[in-house]
Amino acid sequence: MVNYLLFVDGSDNSNRALQFIKNKLLNSNNKGDKITLMHFVHRIENSWLNPISDNLNKLSNIEEEQKSKDLEKNYIEKCKKSFPDEIQWRYISIIKENAEDVIEAIKEQNPDIVVVGTRGNGFLKKMFLGSFSEMVLKHSPYPVLIIP
């Protein structure tokens, strides 16, 4: 039995990572394999000193929460269509404020393997890895598989 933890964000790379795991699970003879899809909601802290910035942060947080709900609905539909009943899956949405929150969430799930797609933002697509996938790779206490 393998317990996969897949980070999802709605990007093409994230969807390719889901497809990779789907193919792996559907072609596996291992009954009882599990997949947890995890999405982080980015929370912007409010500033007590600047009320204008505070209101913009509140609007950004509301928008981020709505995007997260839409993403969750989308992935739940994909999983219901993609996975047979014998494959256990679940979707988790977690608020994060920093890298430590991400690593703590990984530890709480205790996966056999962490799977993340590259996003590739920044300078030459962050030299082929996105900053999130790079951070997970460097700090995860579990094996990490990066899907381009």
Image: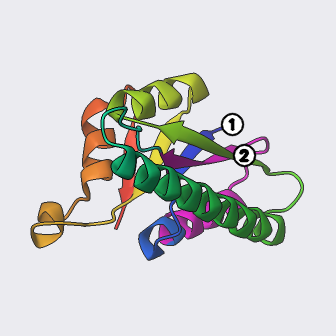
Image position, residue 19 (x, y; %): 58, 69
Q: Would residue 68 be found to the left or right of residue 79 on screen?
A: left
Tell me the quarter of the image containing the C terminus. Answer: bottom left
Pick the front one: 104 or 84: 104
Report the residue at 76% width, 70% height from top: 82
Q: Quadrant of the N terminus?
A: top right
Residue 97 visible? The answer is: yes
Q: Describe the colour scheme in one phrase.
A: rainbow
* Residue corresponding to mark 1: 1
Mark identifier at residue 30: 2
Where does the magenta region start and end? 16-42
Residue furthest out toward the bottom: 12
Which class describes the residues within 10 Å of circle 1: few (<14), some (14-19), or many (20+)? few
Residue 40 in magenta stretch: yes
Report the front residue among 43 and 82: 43
x, y percentage for residue 2? 63, 39
